[in-house]
Amino acid sequence: MIGKLDDYLRFNETALNLRGQRQQLIASNIANADTPNYKARDIDFNSAMKSALARSGAATGTAMATAAVQPAELARTSTTHLSAKSGHGGNSGVNGVPLLYRNIQQGAVDGNTVDMDAERNAFADNAIRYEAGITMISGQIKSMLSAIQG
């Protein structure tokens, strides 16, 4: 029963998690708008969503399918070196999808590639889509409650 409920909510849960991670990434771009040589980053949401859904499907599937989805671990010569899977600071990306650099809209003398207009638009777009995801998952929960209560 619990597994079926998880399967029922998995898509929207995964989408909300990715939207939250993307929001953090965009917020990081905005926070570093004045940092010299900072390069604006983003993710390809569709690829990250496909990767996340493949992983969640692989979790219920065979171990061989799970091994095919996992990214390779890089060899480190010291324990102080950052892992490739260490998070947003490295190149590990989100759910195995690498972080992408945004195309330069307006070059800055200090090498910073953050375009505040583009970041604000991406932030607002992602926030609206996040809210839509919350509305969808809320609707799913309401329909489950009405089915349970009759």
Image: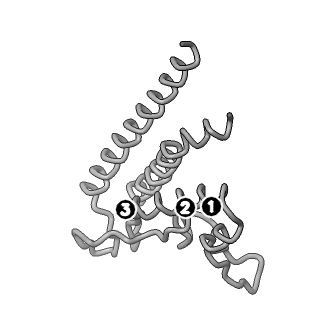
Give the residue at mark 2: 54
- Disc 1 and disc 2: Cα gap in Å? 6 Å
**Could you tell me the amino acid type at mark 3?**
Asp
Give the mark nearer the N terminus: 1 vs 3.
Answer: 3
Nearer to us: label 2 or label 3:
2
Please state which amino acid type lies under the numbered disc 2.
Ala
Can residue 42 be seen in this snapshot?
no
How far across and how far down the image is residue 140, in percent?
48, 30
Quarter of the figure with the N terminus? top right
Secondary-structure class at tag 2: helix
Determine contact: label 1, label 2, CB under 8 Å.
Answer: yes
- Name the residue: 31% across, 55% down: 119
Dot 1 surroundings within 10 Å: few (below 14), some, or many (20 or more)? some
Q: Relative to 120, is 31 on the left or the right?
A: right
- Callout 1 amino acid: Ala
In the image, residue 97 above or below residue 22: below
User: Is residue 4 shown to the viewer in this render?
Assistant: yes
Numbered disc 1: secondary structure: helix
Distance Cα–Cα, label 1 vs label 3: 42 Å
Placement of the C terminus among the 4 image quadrants: top right
Q: Mark 1 touching mark 3, by CB under 8 A?
A: no
**Numbered label attached to residue 8:** none
- Number of numbered labels in the structure image: 3
Give the secondary structure at mark 3. Answer: loop
Q: Position of residue 71 (x, y in %)?
A: 61, 74
Query: Residue at label 3?
Result: 34
* Residue tagged 1: 58
Toward the viewer: 9 or 34? 9
